[in-house]
Image (cartoon, coloured by chain):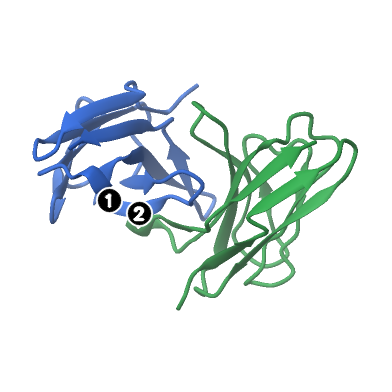
């Protein structure tokens, strides 16, 4: 059972435009949601997170929106740059028996076209 | 600089061999994790450890073993019982919550 889903395996966007990456989840007990960026043959790097008690968090060109009623979050990148081309993973965290566990989606490959 | 170091970056294993992947962190994080990445499957949790001398199985622990003798170190052994070990392995540590993981740079294991 996939608790965190990224239904779009890939996305292409023109440089300067907005990139919108989507993520759906099923467990209402998740307390934080996070986005990671990953280049080939490297470890993922943390981008931005949002607490389940908020509906928006912004950091420079990156904004994450959380819609709890729809169990949906999205990452907006504005403006998109060629260096943003990577695989983006969303993740959700839950504290289980005192340990934080993070559950990842399958990733969306973003390609920003120059 | 604080971070997580994984070694080696590339590893080749013969059929029937055990191999050990190293993971060291100097972030003073209590929790450490091992994930496996396969194409189209995202990141799947193998093992995790909250404190020294304690660890828990993740979703795909069969064929793997770990130890946590020191806070800084969380090595993963891929045993010969793991039927499909070729993958990209990622180690991570965390203080939890909205801070997420800090990942290492990964080890690509190939069975030859």
The chain to which mark 2 is attached is: A
Residue A36 placement, left or right of A2: left
Residue A52 appearing in the image: no
Across and down, in percent, residue B3 comes to 49, 69
For label 1, the SS is: strand
Q: CA distance from mark 2 to mark 1?
A: 8 Å
* Residue at the (32%, 25%) spot, across then down: A10
The blue-tinted chain is A
Which label sits on residue A46? Answer: 2
The location of residue B74, given as percent across then percent down, is 67, 62
- Quadrant where the C terminus of chain B lies? top right
Dot 2 crowding, Cα within 10 Å, few <14, some 14–19, many 20+: some
Relative to A108, is A59 on the left or the right? left
Residue shown at the point (62%, 72%) measured from the top left: B72
Q: Residue at x 63, y 55 (%)?
A: B9
A42 sits to left or right of B91? left
The image quadrant where one finds the N terminus of chain B is bottom left
Q: Which chain is green?
A: B
Furthest residue toward front: A114
Q: Residue A114 at x, y = what percent? A: 17, 37
Residue that label 1 marks: A49
Q: Position of residue A35 (x, y in %)?
A: 32, 45
- Residue at (22%, 36%) from the top-left corner? A112
Q: Residues within 10 Å of mark 1 (few under 14, many from 20)?
A: many
Q: How many marks?
A: 2
Q: Are marks 2 and 1 in contact (CB under 8 Å)?
A: yes
Q: Is residue A105 left or right of residue B9?
A: left
In the rendered image, the vertical position of residue A110 relative to residue B103, given as above or below: above
Relative to the observer, which residue lies in front, A43 or A23? A43
């Amino acid at each position: 059972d996939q608790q965190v889903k990224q239904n779009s395996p890939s996305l292409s966007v023109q440089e300067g435009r907005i990139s919108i990456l989507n993520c759906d989840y099923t467990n209402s007990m998740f307390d934080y949601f996070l986005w990671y960026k990953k280049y080939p043959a490297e470890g993922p790097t943390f981008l931005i997170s949002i607490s389940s008690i908020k509906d928006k968090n912004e950091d420079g060109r990156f904004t994450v929106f959380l819609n709890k009623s729809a169990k949906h979050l999205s990452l907006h990148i504005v403006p998109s740059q060629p260096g943003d081309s990577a695989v983006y993973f969303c993740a959700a965290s839950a504290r289980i028996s005192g340990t934080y566990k993070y559950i990842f989606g399958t990733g969306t490959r973003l390609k920003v076209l120059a | 600089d604080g971070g997580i170091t994984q070694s080696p970056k590339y590893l080749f294993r013969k059929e029937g061999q055990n191999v050990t992947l190293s993971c060291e962190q100097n972030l003073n994080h209590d929790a450490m994790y091992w994930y496996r990445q396969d194409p189209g499957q995202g990141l799947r949790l193998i093992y995790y450890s909250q404190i020294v001398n304690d660890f828990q199985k993740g979703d795909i622990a069969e064929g793997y073993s770990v130890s946590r003798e020191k806070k800084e170190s969380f090595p993963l052994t891929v045993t010969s019982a793991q039927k499909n070990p070729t993958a990209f392995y990622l180690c991570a540590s965390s203080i939890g919550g909205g801070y997420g993981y800090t990942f290492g740079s990964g080890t690509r294991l190939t069975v030859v």
